[in-house]
Amino acid sequence: MNDKEKTPYVVSSKSYAAVAINCAAKAGEWIKSKQGTVQQLNTKTSAQDLVTEVDKGAEQMIRRLILTHFPDHAILGEEGVEPGPEASAKALETALEEDYVWIIDPVDGTTNYVHGFPFYSVSIALAYQGEIILGVIYDPSRDELFIAEKGKGAYVHGNPTRVSGEAVLSDSLVATGFPIDAASNLPQNMEALQAIVPKVRNVRAGGSAALHLAYVAAGRLSAYWEIGLNAWDVAAGVLLIEESGGRVTDTNGSPYSLKVRNIAATNGAIHEELLQVLADAAF
């Protein structure tokens, strides 16, 4: 082992990474402390699209902390955007007019959180001129913090993460999510699910896009796909996977950008095989 490999992962107190870690940890601790106390449950685009006062409070906490350190940076947060894909696209376009944009999902997996199912996370990414340069995903239930910096690798608990080694889809554990848009996206996703289930070892649907992506990065899942997502759902996780040796595209195989809503994320080795199954399902 050379000296470079022995060097532990360390962030400086004033770095973007340190601020993101602080934001995720503080918000996550507060979110967990509020578990089971939600008083008001509202919906956004559908009965399945939930938002609570905890989501809103956590986002405000993260916004304040970021702006304390970087007052000239833009912030794109889920709770600051009107529901619906058109509003999301417009908000993203406006935010990207700035060089630095923080992209926040204060509680990714709100439905799980409301029901006490411990699979939700805080997701924070930083983009510079449209490119993701930092991603942090924090799971308060397990006290696991995943972090990636562009060109510096990805880590959990300070240990490097690497994607899994499955070479074929039939050996793979794959995850998906069920879109909140039941009218159009859900039937399309069910067709893909029906095509994929017989071809993989098994399928999971945990209910947090960010954690699914983090799990692909950490080698716990071989792949993940979902449609109808937003930048704040996936930005941090995309960088985690890329810095862990995996691959992320849209479901048609086009390169990922912050505007992509339909995600295919894998260990790289099974990527083309997954895309082919999705294509065969008229995805």
Image: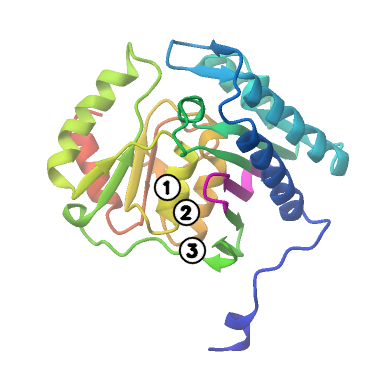
Amino acid type, label 2: Ile
- Give 164 or 96, whichever is nearer the viewer: 164
Amino acid type, label 1: Val
For label 1, the SS is strand
What number is the disc on residue 161? Answer: 3
In the rendered image, residue 184, in percent from the top left (x then y), is placed at 32, 14
- Residue 128 in view here: no
Q: Magenta part mainly helix, strand or loop?
A: strand
- The stretch in magenta equals 125-144
Residue furthest out toward the front: 36
Q: Which residue, given by chain and number where applicable, does mark 1 sit on? A: 248
Q: CA distance from mark 2 to mark 1?
A: 7 Å
In the rendered image, residue 159, in percent from the top left (x then y), is placed at 55, 68
Q: Which residue, given by chain and number where applicable, does mark 2 sit on? A: 241
- Whether the residues at callouts 2 and 1 have beta carbons within 8 Å, the answer is yes
> Which image quarter: residue 253?
top left
Q: Earlier along the polypeptide chain: callout 1 or callout 3? A: 3
